[in-house]
Amino acid sequence: MDDLHYLMWAGLAAAMVGLSKGGLPTVGMLSVPILSLFMSPVKAVVMLLPIYIISDLVGLWLYRKNFSAINLKILVPAGVGGVLVGWLTASLVSDTAVKMMIGLMGVGFVLNAWRKRHTAQTPRPASWKKGLLWGSLSGFTSFISHAGGPPFQVYLLPQQLPKLVFAGTSTLFFAVINLAKLGPYHQLQPYGATELTGALVLIPFALVGTVVGAYLTRKIADDWFFKWVQLGLLAISIKLIVDVLRA
């Protein structure tokens, strides 16, 4: 029963990863907290990386025609640089500080967006200055705890991109970031048979989640899609802040 209980929750965590790769942002951030019920957060982060990469492959195919090239040109180098900084400072950076920073940014962004919801907002163009800042922060926080979504969304949401372009840009960006994390993760905590076997068992859950996520992304109306993105961002941000305060 213990094994069945673990498989149920671990499968849910993997499915959450798949849903995010299918186009439902912020959902994947629930995966590490779920797995942390059964193992250390560090081990959970390491074990989930292969799940992210496998799901990325499906997401790349699903969104191969829907993405913002200019934003990827800005975000990808910045994000890889953020991963490098996370690797070099892994022993110096507090998980608590990173969680609080992500949480406060996310809450602040959503509250500001809601404050302006009744005023007409002009879509912002892609920006090298802002993209390099938020992209590098996204890569850094993604390295720490697979939590790169909030900084990425703070940068991209004001551009008011079409729904599928937004989802595809997110999928392609994090596919590159996750590949960039593979070497540093293995260097900091080498993959063993236990982690690889655990990841292998969870792959079917992630693949199903990816396909379901892509289906829901296409079916949900654009207005409701971005409302759910904001609600998800707010919920995750509040949870991160609460986790820090409890600790």
Image (tube, grey):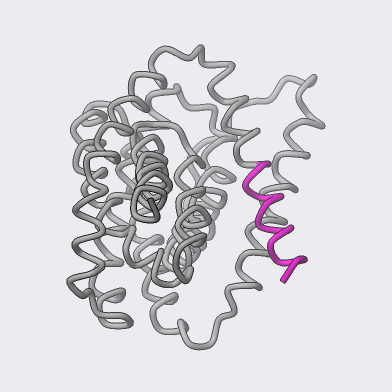
- Please determine whether, in this image, residue 206 is positioned above or below residue 114: below
In-image side of 212 versus 64 (left or right): right
- Please determine whether, in this image, residue 72 is positioned above or below residue 24: below
Residue at the farthest bottom position: 91
Q: What residue lies at 60% left-to-right and 69% top-to-bottom?
A: 98
Residue 73 visible to the viewer = yes
Q: What residue lies at 33% left-to-right and 58% top-to-bottom?
A: 48
Q: Is residue 204 magenta?
A: no
Q: The magenta stretch spans which residues? A: 234-247
Q: Main secondary structure of the magenta part?
A: helix
Residue 29 spot, x, y in % from top left = 50, 49
Q: What residue lies at 23% left-to-right and 69% top-to-bottom?
A: 194
Residue 91 spot, x, y in % from top left = 48, 87
In-image side of 225 versus 167 (left or right): right
Residue 57 sits in quarter: top left
Residue at the farthest front position: 1
Q: Quadrant of the C terminus?
A: bottom right
- Please determine whether, in this image, residue 98 is positioned above or below residue 87: above
Q: Nearer the viewer, residue 198 or 241?
A: 198
Residue 192 spot, x, y in % from top left = 20, 75
Q: Nearer the viewer, residue 139 or 95?
A: 95
Q: Nearer the viewer, residue 176 or 198?
A: 198
Residue 157 sits in quarter: top right
